[in-house]
Structure formats: structure tokens, C-alpha cells
Image (cartoon, helix red, strand yellow):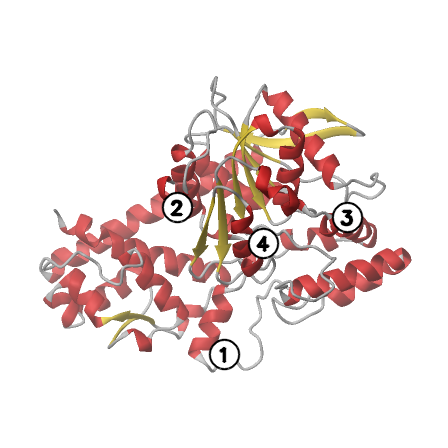
Amino acid sequence: MDAATRLRPLLDAVHDTAAEVRAKSPDYFADRPLRLDRDLLARYGGPAGADGTLARLLGDAYGLTVEPVDGPEALTAVDRLLAERATGGSGASGASATAPPEPELAAVLRSVAAAQQERDRLDRAAAERIAARPPERTGVMGGVLHYAAAGPRREGAPPVVLLNALGMGPALWYPLMGQLAQEHRVVTWAPRGTAPGSRPLRVRDHAADLEAVLVAEGATACHLVGWCTGPKVAMAFHRRRPDAVRSMVWLHGSFRRTDDAGGREPDTSYERNLEELCRAVAARPAMADTLRRIFDGGGGADSGTSTGTDAAPGTEADPRRFAEEVLARPARALDEELRRPFATGPVLAAYARQLLDYWADDALAHAPQVRVPVLCVGAAYDRIASPERLAQAVDRFPDARYRQLTGATHHSMYDRPREIAGLLTGFLRAVEPTGAPRTPAQL
């Protein structure tokens, strides 16, 4: 095995972690090191890892400072994310080998880093092509639905339908679509009902829109990936057309209900604040514009729609707290996109009306009737939709499993499209073509 192949898990971990953090906090590594356990460095680099040579060359190749430390207790959340990626979560690299001499090792690192940058460029180009493509169209009750599509239609191959969150556009999905379209036909759209003057829509109306898209695609079956509010739409569609669903994935999905009189629901602060806003807007629609400005003026990811690009007070001086706070942020490129539901007073009024209807729907009552495989994907730093609630929902389905992503947020499909695509593709390959249920161990 050559040096590049032996080192690739570590190099991919460094690249992916640095890129994800920089997308959220561009200056994070300007005065903060990336810490790697000496044992991990030694396993990958032998003497070059033990004496700090590999750390120094990694820093040169990736434009940051790599600091060897003794033991995992010295690592921040960012460092632990890298370590898990490098070891596959096993705590050991499995790559004990002596690195080549320093000049050759430096050349290997530069070569791999350049290849990673080229791969990223191609991935961005694929996402941009999907974004630039004219949307598909289909007639729906009350008008025309425009949807984004990528990947070839194949006879007998169900499309992958990405069920978007209420109020959101398709832009968050383009990087993931670029990955999935290599093997699947993939479609998504902005849920209707928040444009000024649009008619009120309910969960069942969004399920009808899904059926209209399948008809337009000439598809009789599909795989459903529901993000955020998407799972309840998927469940409404399953009640309507159980024969058309081959599998379901809940990507940071929410089954939140508002009839929790005992206060036992594991809500996030964001969910509680958002419900308060929605009820205030529903009671006084004329105040929607004023209320949205108050809600959007908070100073952290848990307050209103703030995208969390500014550090919470006191975190900058504490490396551990600041690392966690940065990982919990959305990428800065999403700042405007995430404010779409709060763009204007009328948009917020329509969004609030739909969310209250959504929260009143008890989708999990139908869970025992879902006989296809279900994968629930949670995120350790999801501050939008409670990952605890999603984990609890797993037991309600006959054939379901839960996977939590280390260091990830509510927007993992944008932050980590290759990782999420690999997770989804592996799941879909394991699903029987007939949609017959399989045990979690088989998946």
C-alpha cells in the first residue's frame, strides 16, 4: 500500500473538518490550532508522527497549525470530530506504518490536498449545474408546482424524493443532489403556501403535491427523504399511497406535536420560541412584520432565526465552548436562505399558519402501519429540531434504526453532502426492490 493510500483517512479527516469549520467561521484557524493526538499521528506517520514532522507538514498542506497533544482529554469538539473521521469512530487508525522521508511525505500531502480541492471544485460545479437547470413543472390544485430534478430516469428505479422543510427553497439540497444523482433520479421543491396571497395549505395538501410530482415523473413508487417538517408530509402520503413508498429516511426530522399538556416533549429552545411566535402571528396577523423583526434579532442559534455567525458572549476565550459553538452554526453561505420563512410579514403569517397545522398533526399514530425500512438520522448539534424526539420515534416503527451524526447540525445535507450521500446510498442499496421490510441488522 503506498503512502497516499495509507494516509488518506487522516488526510480526508483533516480536509473535511477544516472545510466544514471554515464554512462556518472563516477565521477559526487563524489563531487556533487543530489538535491531533500524538498516538493517532504516530499510527499514521510512525517516527514522523511521533516527532511532530507529520503535524508540521499537515499544517503546511492545509494552511493551518496542527498541534500534537497527549491524550483525547486535550481535544476540543472540532478535534474530536476529526479524530472520529480519521478512525471511523473506533479510536484506532488501523494504519500503523512508517511514513516516507520528509521530502516525499510533503509531496504526498500536497498531492492529496490538491486532489481534494479538485474534487470539491467538481462537486460545486455539479451543484451549480443543478441550480441553473430550468425547473420541471407539474399541475397541482391551485396552480403549478416547479420542482428541481437531477439524475437519469431509469425504468423500474424509483426516484429519491427530498421532502423539503416548510418555507424553505431547494438551494440547501443542491450539493446532496449532485452526489445522489450519480446513481438515482432525485427531485425536490420549495413547499407551496408561503407566497403572499397563496391559499392556505395543510399537511395533506403537501402530500397531494408529492403525488403530482410522481405522476409528472412517471413514477409509481419512490424513496422518501424527509427533512425537518418533511416526515409528516411523507407519513400523510404513506397513508394515502402505502404501495408507492419503498423506504423512508428522516433527516433531522421532526414529529413535534402541540398537544403535550404534560410538557414532556423534548423541545429545543428554538422550537419553543418559534411556537410562541407562530401563535402571536396567528392571533394578530397585522403585527407579523413587527414580530418577525423581534424574532430575527436574537444573538444566537437558539434565539429566533439568527444564523449564529456571531459568537455567543464568553465563548471566544474558551476554546472548548467556542469549538462547540462553531460546529453548531449553519454555514455562512446559508444566512439569507435560512431567513426565507421570515422574509416579510405576509410570508411569516402564511408560514405560521402552516406550522401550527403541522404541529397539530399526530403523524406517529400511523407509524405501526409503515412496513418499509425507515432510517432516522439525527445530529449532535441540531438546535432546530430535537434529536431526542427523533430518537424516541424510532420505536414507533416496525422496521427502523437511528443514526446520530457526530458534530453535525440540522443542515448536514449542505455541510456534508458526500457523507450524507454515502449514508443514503448504502441504505437504499440495502432496501429490497420490492420494498419488503428488512431488519435493522440487515441494513
- CB of mark 2 within 8 Å of CB of mark 1? no
Q: Residues within 10 Å of mark 3 (few under 14, many from 20)?
A: some
The residues bearing labels 2 and 4 have C-alpha atoms spaced at a distance of 18 Å
Q: What amino acid type should be assigned to the residue bearing mark 1?
A: Glu
**At which x and y percent is residue 352?**
78, 53
Q: Quadrant of the C terminus?
A: top left
Mark toward the start of the polypeptide (1 vs 3): 1
Name the residue beneath numbered marker 2. Answer: 120
- Is residue 55 in sight in this rendering? yes
Q: CA distance from mark 1 to mark 4?
A: 22 Å
**Residue at numbered disc 1:** 316
Q: Residue at x 29, y 49 (%)?
A: 114
Sequence order check: which comes first, mark 4 or mark 3? Answer: 4
For the residue labelled by badge 4, is the local secondary structure a helix, a strand or a loop? helix
Mark-to-mark CA distance, 4 and 3 = 26 Å
Q: Position of residue 186 (x, y in %)?
A: 52, 32
- The mark closer to the camera, 1 or 3, is 3
Residue 334: which disc? Answer: 4
Residue drawn at (12%, 62%), measured in percent from left and top? 102
Q: Which element type, helix, strand or loop, lies under badge 3?
A: helix
Give amino acid for label 3: Asp
**Residue 335 location (% of width, % of height):** 61, 57
Which mark's residue is nearer the viewer, 4 or 3?
A: 3
Disc 3 marks which residue?
357
| Mark 2 or 1, nearer chain start | 2
Q: Secondary structure at mark 2?
A: helix
Q: Upstream in the sequence, badge 1 or badge 4?
A: 1
Residue 349 placement (x, y as % from top left):
82, 52
Type of the residue with mark 4: Leu
- Amino acid type for the residue under numbered disc 2: Asp
